[in-house]
Image (cartoon, rainbow, N blue to C red):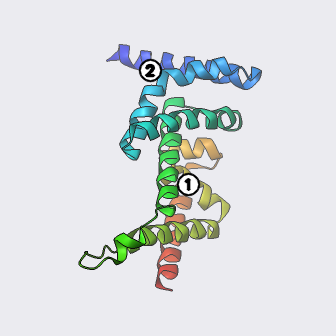
Amino acid sequence: MKFIKNNARIQEQDDAALIAHYKSSGNLEALGKLYNKYMHLVFGVCLNYLKDEEQSKDAVMQIFEELVLKVKIHEVQNFKSWLHVLTRNHCLMALRKQSKNTTVSIDDTFVENTDFVHLDIDDTKERQLTVMEKCMETLSKEQRVSVDLFYLQEKCYKEVADLTGYEMVKVKSYIQNGKRNLKICIEKNNGE
């Protein structure tokens, strides 16, 4: 068991060295080498969300293109975990974009003797996401950042405290109050 922990620590150090090299030199080869180690995992996550092999292959390339910019501006502690969150968010945004662009044939919808499929489900999801985004903006900066890191980026309390510089007690308070305020805002806006 000890060997596995040491191996994971060495992996993180290697990743950190490649990130540091890329940030200082802009050398895409270093970023490519880092990404190549996890590309199979990225493809697996994409396939799980997108359910389409070709679309997943495209997503793997698009995510690398995102990395070129995002690695330079983000402070990445654990590249593998950070990449997983980035990949998941990329796929969710792609699915969201697809649901906006879904087209329905008029013939299929209005032909006699066909069952009417209620398409309000996608509209409902879209409205809920829009309301949540608006409500996130109503939170204080501390609450918004803490809630985003904790729930959307799946960081633990300690990681949120480390990333933000907030005290652990404050982080817990920001998350608890932010969640409550978000819930109140969402309920209020869904009632309208």
Q: Residue 189: image x %, image y %?
A: 52, 80
Real-space Cα separation, disc 2 to disc 1, in angstroms: 27 Å
Q: Looking at the figure, which quarter contains the N terminus?
A: top left
Outermost residue, right direction?
25
**Which residue is tagged 2?**
8
Decide which of 174, 154 is in the foreground and name it: 154
Q: Is residue 75 visible?
A: no
Q: Residue at x 56, y 21 (%)?
A: 34
Q: Residue at x 53, y 76 (%)?
A: 185
Outermost residue, bottom direction?
192
Decide which of 53, 186 is in the foreground and name it: 53
Q: Residue at x 53, y 37 (%)?
A: 82
- Amino acid at the residue labelled 1: Asp
Q: Of the numbered discs in the image, which one, if any, rests on residue 58? A: none
Q: Identify the mark nearer the N-term, 2 or 1.
A: 2
**Which residue is tagged 1?**
148
Describe residue 107's horizontal placement relative to residue 169 as left or right: left
Compared to residue 75, the image places residue 51 above or below, namely: below
Q: Quadrant of residue 136?
A: bottom right
Decide which of 152, 10 is in the foreground and name it: 152
Marks counted in the figure total: 2
Q: Residues within 10 Å of mark 2 (few under 14, many from 20)?
A: few
Compared to residue 87, the image places residue 120 above or below, namely: below
Q: Secondary structure at mark 2?
A: helix
Outermost residue, top direction?
3
Q: Residue 56: image x %, image y %?
A: 45, 38
Q: Quadrant of residue 148?
A: bottom right
Q: Residues within 10 Å of mark 1 (few under 14, many from 20)?
A: some
